[in-house]
Amino acid sequence: MTADRYWLILLSLIAVTLFHLGIANAEGQRSTSGRPNVLLIVSEDNSPNLGCYGDVYAKTPNLDRLAAEGVRFEHAFVTTASCSESRSSMLTGLFPHQNGQIGLATHGYCMFGHQANVASLLKSNGYRTGIIGKLHVNPAKAFPFDFQWNDQRYCSFSHRDVRKIAEIAGQFMTASKQPFFLMVNYPDAHLPWLAQQKGVPDKPLAAGEVPPPAWVGLDTPALRQGAADYYNCIQRLDTAVGLLLAKLAETGQAKRTLVIYLADHGAQFPRGKLTCYESGLAVPLIVSWPGKARTGSVRDELVSTVDLLPTILEATGLKNPGGLPGRSLVPLLKNESVAWREYLFAEYHSHYPPLYFPQRTVRDGRYKLIVSLLQDRPDPTREVYLSPNTRWSIVREAELGAAPSNVRRAYETWHDAPPNQLYDLQNDPCELNNLANRPEWDAVLERLRRQLTRWQHRTDDPLTDPDKLARLTKEEDTAAAGYEADRHFRSSHWLYPRYLRAVQKDQSGPP
């Protein structure tokens, strides 16, 4: 073969290879560019106190508009009413007892290693990933975000600059032509309830203009002031979402973006955050997906934050890795007729060590069962809410003593939690009247208890093992003693990831 012929053949092969690589690359780009962006908006510590949920005191025109343009879920719940644990479920699609994040990340609690999550799954499939605000799940390196911004001067419990947050989000949205996943975490409505920040809201509500939440069961001047400032936080949150969505519209990408808004758990009033009552677990959930979701619809199904990851995966055309307990909401968004779950589950472990009090809960369309796994102590969250020495305290024991008898009994049940609490949510939505010890309700209690046991087995709940429960309790109590001795105590040597982790298995089953 002559040298000229050799080089001609070589150049031809190179040209053909480059041609096919160009086609493959173009097809990959077309495939990626056809996928929707995902904008996940998460607020802090707020129940469904929005105008679109029927709250007459809430001024939330932007979130109301999002609901009118998308789908509002009437019965949406987090897996647990504590921040890190709840967020871990949003990101991994697993219950905290499955992924290991059973307490606050700031106190050293962590997942069982590197769990697959929305950031890792989307990034490995061509998405650019970003997060604004706190992640609050350990280990942080398990979440491969391309962009992270959490400047405490603008986005923190003390500083809430909603304009700056929208500006940073807009920069991320326009930084690349790749489809993006962006999680925006707002500090509202976490304590302290700041009446106004950077002029937002422009006309803060004053004490007396709104009542305390009904499920608190009390009405005092301090509660009225707290309620006013809580609603001021909700107004600022609404302004923030409006600015963020306006920025998305400016980029020209609104029509190809799946927008999900929800709170990480309920409001931080007594019997709310850190409890298994509806006031802690129920959250607003609004989803907009232009051209896909049926606009202005309201869904009554029982949905959970473990459904978010399956939903995002189906919407973006990615394969579900399996082993997830949740279900995609896409059929509900599209108003399709589909069999859905009859029972919904949640749990609680800890927040920081002194607030350890493991519980499990199940509800159907009407009844709710809360099971307390320990009977050797009171529920410590009640003490924190009523102690005059904590920043959470907004109710005094003397005020509780003057409350109606059913409210006093409810607070006693909260404090000295019996093994079972059963509530009729239709006739007792504030969960003031425990029916668990009444024989006429035994059949309902047993039915719910059977469903709870099946769920625990299906999801490999480690606390069904008495030895593991005892070991975790001992470890938590040791950590609590360290915390009581030094309020700056942070445990970085938790042993529970070694003995609680179970092998994940297929959890597919009846809806």
Image: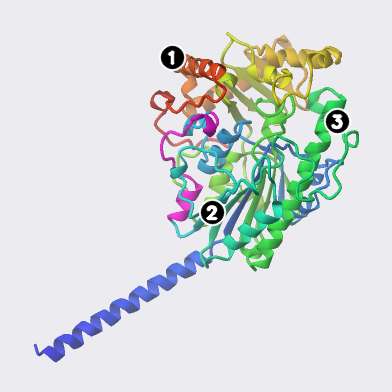
CA distance separating discs 2 and 1: 41 Å
Can you say whether 307 is above or below 388 in the image? Answer: below
Q: Quadrant of the C terminus?
A: top right
In the image, residue 360 sits, relative to residue 52, either above or below, namely above
Is 188 in the magenta?
Answer: no
- Disc 2 secondary structure class: strand
Place residue 433 in its image quadrant. top right
Q: Which image quadrant: the N terminus?
A: bottom left
Q: Amino acid at mark 3?
A: Arg
Which numbered disc, 3 or 1, marks the residue that appears first in the sequence? 3
> Which range is magenta?
103-124
Mark toward the viewer: 3 or 1: 3
**Horizontal and vertical percent position of residue 53:** 79, 42
Q: Position of residue 62 (x, y in %)?
A: 77, 53
What amino acid is found at the position of numbered circle 1 in the picture? Asp
In this view, the residue farthest toward the right is: 208
The location of residue 166, given as percent across then percent down, is 67, 57
Give residue 130's mark: 2
Percent coordinates x, y for residue 392 in the rendering: 71, 26
> Dot 1, crowdedness within 10 Å: few (<14), some or many (≥20)?
few
For numbered disc 3, what is the local secondary structure?
A: helix
Per the rendering, the mark at residue 467 is 1
Residue beneath disc 3: 224
117 falls in the magenta region: yes
Q: Residue at x 61, y 47 (%)?
A: 329
152 vs 272, nearest the viewer: 152
First in sequence, mark 2 or 1: give its number.
2
N-term mark: 3 or 2: 2
Circles 2 and 1, Cβ within 8 Å, touching? The answer is no
